[in-house]
Image: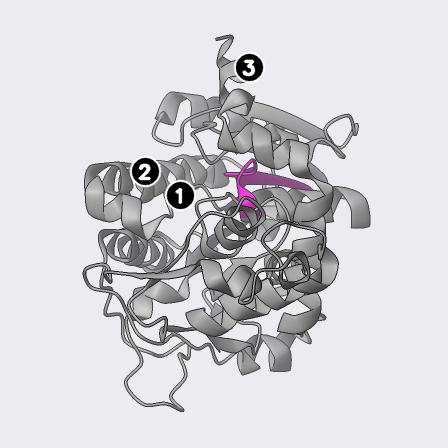
């Protein structure tokens, strides 16, 4: 099959593309605007594959979407393009409304027009897979509650509200127009090629440089952590085998408080880079943990997210391969081995070269 992936230069999108190119016979058309979070260097290992094509396109550009769909005739659209950073959404919500809501609307309409033009067999096979987040569900109240596919939406931030809006649009296009759609909602992803503004890579890179490790409030916020390569496998399986009209929650079964995550990273760094001047082995009594700094909590910060992923496991047979401990070790080791990639993201050289600056 031919799969069109929007946002394929982003963290999760690039993992999906690497998985498809490296592990299947399917081909990929990567559609990405290349904002600050889009980095084609994350696709270096597959960029020369004859099964891979890149198109620099804004999903808000309907004319270009029509052109790409007509040119490449995909069997599946996997929609991952989105503004996704909560703090940025609080500071600049308009970008999130524009990309996540208007962009999704444009892609739905372009896909519907394309789908209606297909012959009977290709029309039957076509699917529109929308990738979303567990943040649309809001905050869990009880310590043992879990988000299910039937949980009511209660978004707390401009980011999660914009994603909730896009989820509703996708389901409406299925109910109203019959467009064959699927929706997945995932828990917090982590792993290689994660943009350094996110918690885990931020802590790894700050610790190595002796910078503060900022923790919102007491760090008691609980998240379910999902290794990105496990998520990529799940998304591909849902796109190929999921039932049209259904929603699937995808989680890692790894609930950790933010302070636990940071301390685990510090412990791994003590083991893997004891020669670092900020480690205990170098004479610092607290080691990397001494860099932990508690800062004022952000507005509307949800306390606990946790996914019930039993449906995707029961119906499609998917389960995560990585525990949090094994996935975090792989992640820390990747950042230690890929310092050049990290530096190019941190100093914006990956963007300047792309723009010819």
Name the foreground residue: 125 vs 65: 65
Circle number at residue 206: none
Q: Residue at x 63, y 56 (%)?
A: 232
Circle number at residue 82: 1
Name the foreground residue: 159 vs 349: 349
- Residue 77 as seen in the image, left or right of residue 317: left
How far, Cα to Cα, is label 2 from label 3?
A: 24 Å
- Mark found first going from the N terminus, 2 or 3: 2
- Mark found first going from the N terminus, 1 or 2: 1
Query: Dot 3: within a 10 Å radius of its alpha carbon, few (fewer than 14), some, or many (20 or more) residues?
Result: few
Q: x, y percentage for residue 286?
A: 53, 67
Circles 2 and 3: CB atoms closer than 8 Å: no
Q: Is residue 56 above or below residue 254?
A: above
Circles 1 and 2: CB atoms closer than 8 Å: yes
Q: x, y percentage for residue 1?
A: 71, 44
Residue highlighted by disc 3: 353
Q: Residue at x 29, y 57 (%)?
A: 160
Circle number at residue 99: 2
Name the foreground residue: 11 vs 100: 11
Tell me, yes or no, if residue 250 can be seen here: no
Query: Dot 1: within a 10 Å radius of its alpha carbon, few (fewer than 14), some, or many (20 or more) residues?
Result: many
How far, Cα to Cα, is label 1 from label 2?
A: 6 Å
Q: Is residue 175 above or below residue 148?
A: above
How far, Cα to Cα, is label 1 from label 3?
A: 23 Å
Q: Is residue 13 magenta?
A: no
- The range drawn in magenta is 2-11
């Amino acid at each position: 099959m031919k799969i069109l992936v929007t946002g394929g230069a982003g963290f999760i999108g690039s993992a999906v593309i690497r998985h498809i190119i490296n592990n299947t016979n399917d081909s990929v058309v990567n559609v990405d605007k290349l904002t600050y979070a889009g980095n084609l260097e994350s696709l270096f290992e597959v960029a020369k594959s004859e099964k891979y094509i890149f198109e620099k396109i804004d999903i808000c550009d309907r004319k270009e979407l029509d052109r790409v769909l007509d040119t490449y005739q995909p069997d599946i659209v996997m929609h991952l393009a989105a503004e996704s950073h909560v703090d940025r959404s609080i500071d600049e919500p308009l970008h999130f409304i524009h990309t996540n809501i208007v962009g999704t609307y444009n892609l739905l309409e372009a896909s519907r027009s394309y789908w209606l033009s297909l012959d009977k067999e290709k029309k039957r096979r076509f699917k529109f897979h929308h990738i979303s987040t567990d943040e649309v569900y809001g905050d869990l109240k009880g310590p043992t509650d879990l988000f299910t596919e039937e949980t009511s939406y209660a978004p707390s931030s401009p980011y999660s509200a914009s994603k909730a809006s896009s989820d509703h649009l996708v389901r409406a296009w299925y109910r109203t127009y019959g467009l064959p759609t699927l929706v997945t909602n995932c828990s917090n992803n982590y792993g290689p090629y994660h943009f350094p503004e996110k918690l885990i890579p931020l802590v790894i890179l700050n610790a190595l440089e002796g910078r503060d490790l900022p923790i919102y409030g007491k760090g008691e916020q609980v998240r379910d952590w999902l290794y990105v390569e496990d998520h990529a496998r799940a998304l591909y399986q849902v796109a190929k085998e999921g039932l049209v009209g259904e929603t699937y929650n995808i989680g890692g079964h790894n609930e950790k408080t933010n302070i636990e995550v940071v301390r685990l990273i510090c412990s791994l760094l003590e083991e893997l880079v004891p020669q670092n001047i900020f480690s205990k082995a170098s004479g610092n009594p607290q080691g990397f943990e001494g860099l932990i700094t508690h800062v004022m909590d952000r507005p509307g910060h949800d306390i606990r997210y946790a996914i019930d992923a039993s449906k995707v496991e029961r119906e499609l047979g998917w389960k995560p391969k990585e525990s949090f401990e094994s996935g975090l070790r792989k992640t820390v080791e990747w950042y230690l081995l890929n310092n050049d990639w990290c530096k190019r993201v941190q100093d914006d050289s990956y963007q300047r070269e792309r723009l010819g600056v």
